[in-house]
Image (cartoon, rainbow, N blue to C red):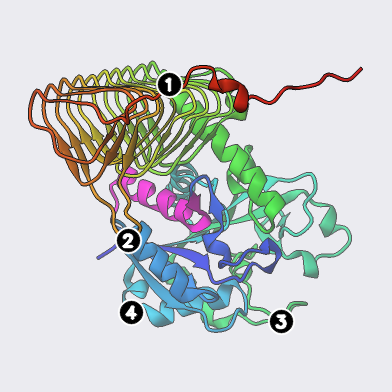
Amino acid sequence: MDEFGIVILAAGQGTRMKLDVPKPLAPIAGRTLIDFSVKAANVFLNNSKRSGRISLVLGHGKEKIEQHMKEQLSDCSWESAHQKEQRGTADALRAYFNDISEAKNRKYTIVMCADTPLITAAEIEALTSELESENLDGVAATFHEENPRGYGRIIRSTTGFKIVEEKDATTEEKKITEVNSGLYILRTEFVLNHLFKLESKNQAREFYLTDLFQADRKVKAVFFSDKYPFLGVNDLTQLQASNRLLQNRIIAKASERGVRFLAPESVLIDDQVEIDSGSIIYPNCVLEGKTKIGKNVLIESGAVIKNSEIADDAKILAYCYLEGAIVKSSASVGPFARLREGTVIGEKSKIGNFVETKKAILEDEVKVSHLSYVGDAEIGARTNIGCGFITCNYDGANKHKTIIGEDSFIGSDSQMIAPISIGKGCYVASGSTINQDMADGDFAIARTKQVTKSGMAKRFIKSSKTHD
C-alpha cells in the first residue's frame, strides 16, 4: 500500500495568464508549471525511499493536461481526478477521494499546487519530518511576504493557529505578513474525519481546505525563512519572475559542476539541459530542450542550441543555430552556421561560417568551411568541401540523397544534382555541376567552354558621371 498520496491541484483556468493553454501548462524553463510540481514530488519519493502515488486534480483543460502528461512525463506514474466545478480547494480534495478508490488507504496526503514551480523535494521533506517528529495531524508551510495581498493569513494564538483567507480577513488580520503557501502534509485519517464536514460560509462561497487548520487541533504552521520556493504564478509577470529564479537555480547547479558562465544573467537554459564540467558559456546563449553538452566545450556568444548533443572539446562559435543536431568531439561549428534536424558532425570536423546542414551525416575530419548548403547527404571522412557548395536535394516534389566518399575534394562553387553518389578519393573541379555518379578515384569537371571576345567589354560597361 502506498504511504503517500501526493495531490497536485491543477483544476484552475488561469484567466489572468492570458495564454491559450490551461494554466498548469504555462511554459517555464523549457517545461510547464505542472512539470515542476510533479518533479518535486518524484524526487521526494525517491530521496525518502517512501512509496507514494502522484494524483492530479484536473478541471479546465483536463484532456490537454492528461495528454501532456502522457507525452512529456511518460516515465512518471500518475492518476487523475476530475473537479467538475471549481468550488474551492477542499472541494478539489473531495474529488480526489471520490474518484480514486485507493486514496483513503494512504497514510499521508500531501497537497501541492500546480502553479508553484519553485517548490522542491527539500521543502516537502522538511514538512514531513516536522509532522512525524511531533506526531501531528497536519502541517502547513508558511513564509513572510511584505506585500501579502492575495494570500491567506496565518493567525497564531497560544493554543495553535488558523488560516484566514484575504476575502474573509479583518483590517487588522490583513496587516499580518505571515502567509499560507498552499503546501500541506496531512494524516489521511484526519482529513477524512473533517473534509466532508467543511462548509462554505465565507465571502467566496467556496469550500476551503485551510479550514482544516484550527487552533484546537494537532496542526502546526511551519515557517520557512526563504519565501522564494513558495511563490505562486497567477499572471505573466509572476511567470517571468519565477522563470528568472529557476534560471538562477539551473545556472548555480551547473556552476557547482564546474561550468563557467561569463555573463550568467544573460543566458537562458532549460531545466532539462545537461552541461558537463570545464565548459564555457559566453553571454547571450540559449540552450533549450534535451540538450546535452560534454566536457570542455566552448559555446560563444549568441549561440542557440535546441535538443542537440555537443561532445567533449567541441566548439560552437558565435551566432550558430543548432536544432536536433549531434556534434562529436573536437569538432568546430561556425561562426554563423545553422545545423538543422538530423545533422551529425564527426570528430574533428569543421563547419564554417554561413554553412547550413539538414539530415547530413559528416564523418570524421570533414571540412565544409564556408557558404554552403549540405542537405540529405552523407560525406566520408577527411573530405574537403569548397566554398559555395550546394547539394541540390529537392526536385520540386521529393528529396534525394547525395553521397560523397572519404578523402575526396569538392572544388568551390560546385553543385551535386541528387540523387548522386561520388566515390572515394574523387576530385571535382571548381565551378562544376555534377549530375552523374563517379567511381572511386574519378576526376570530374563540368563547365562550359570559356569564350573571350577581344575589346568587347566597352559594349557592356556603362560610364558613370560624378556630380559635385
Whether residue 135 is visible, yes or no, is no
Secondary structure of the residue carrying numbered label 1: loop
Dot 4 lies on which element?
Answer: helix
Other residues around mark 3 within 10 Å, as few (<14) / some (14–19) / many (≥20): few
- Callout 2 crowding tier (Cα within 10 Å): few <14, some 14–19, many ≥20: few
- Amino acid type indicated by mark 1: Thr
Q: Which numbered tag is attached to residue 322?
A: none
Q: Which residue is mark 4?
A: 101
In the image, which is nearer the foreground, mark 1 or mark 3? 1
Q: Nearer the viewer, mark 2 or mark 4?
A: 2
Q: Quadrant of residue 367?
A: top left
In the rendered image, the vertical position of residue 322 relative to residue 261, given as above or below: below
The image position of residue 379, as x and y in percent, is 21, 31
| Residue at 53%, 75% in the rendered image | 92
At label 4, the amino acid type is: Ser
Q: Label 3 belongs to which residue?
A: 205
Closest to the camera, between mark 4 and mark 1, is 1
Hey, what amino acid is under mark 3? Arg
Distance from the alpha carbon under mark 2 to that under mark 1: 39 Å
Q: Which labelled disc corresponds to residue 397?
A: 2
In 3D space, how far apart are the residues under numbered discs 3 and 2 (Cα atoms)?
62 Å
Mark 2: which secondary structure? loop
The amino acid sitting under disc 2 is Ala
Report, in whole angstroms, how far the alpha carbon at label 1 lies from the one at label 3.
93 Å
Which label lies toward us, 2 or 1?
1
- Distance, label 2 to label 4, CA atoms, is 55 Å
Secondary structure character of the magenta stretch overall? helix
Q: Nearer the viewer, residue 228 or 417?
A: 417
Task: Between residue 432 and residue 382, name the one nearer to us.
Answer: 432
Report the quarter where the C terminus lies: top right
Identify the residue position indicated by label 1 in the image.
452
Q: For the point 56% across and 58% down, which residue is it?
A: 26
